[in-house]
Image (spheres, grey):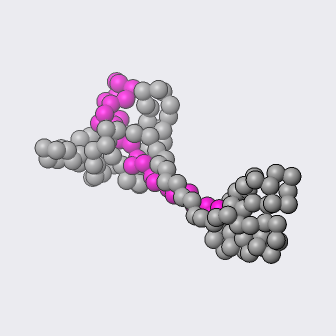
Amino acid sequence: MKLKDNKSNYMKLDLTKPVQTRDGRKVQIIKTDIKSQYPVAAVITSGNGENLVNYTSDGRFDNVRAADPLDLVNVPEKYTYETWVVCYQDTASMLPDKKYFIHFDTPEQANKYAARLKEKPSRSVVVQFKMSQEYTVGAV
């Protein structure tokens, strides 16, 4: 099922995953196979209570407009990207003040690399740390 936004980009709507309205209201899907032009029934929660609303099979509230605040969209999914970083300095190199940053997928890989660096007298581990970034995927 596809849902068109104001920019005419298509976003795939998956009714088996959590949904919300385009403007962020909570939605509970009640039924998806009503014999009608609007076969999806949903309960929309807003500040003044709950409303039963019908939608097209692709989640549109209004068949005429390209996008509506009441259109259904999937709830954006949050992901966290994590990496472990070893920062070191090599005083024997041509650029002795330069710091090197190496990224690893696991703390074990970072620890192993840092241990190898410590075996060489000209290299010193300046810092070793975990870096994480949370990001959201999905349009509202």
Q: Residue at x 63, y 71 (%)?
A: 107
Residue 127 in percent (x, y) is at: 64, 64
Q: Nearer the viewer, residue 33 or 74?
A: 74
Q: Which residues are magenta?
A: 60-86
Q: What residue do we see at 65% from left, 62% from top?
A: 85
Query: Which residue is at a point 63% across and 66% down the rendered structure image?
Result: 128
Q: Nearer the viewer, residue 68 or 16?
A: 68
Can you tell which quarter of the image residue 39 is in?
top left
Q: Is residue 128 visible?
A: yes
Number of marks in the rendered image: 0
Along the line of sight, which residue is nearer the eye, 34 or 70?
70
Position above or below: 6 against 56: above
- From this view, report whether residue 126 is shown above or below residue 2: below
Using residue 120 as the reference point, say whether residue 26 is left or right of it.
left
Residue drawn at (57%, 59%), measured in percent from left and top? 131
Q: Position of residue 120 (x, y in %)?
A: 82, 71
Q: Is residue 107 left or right of residue 92?
A: left
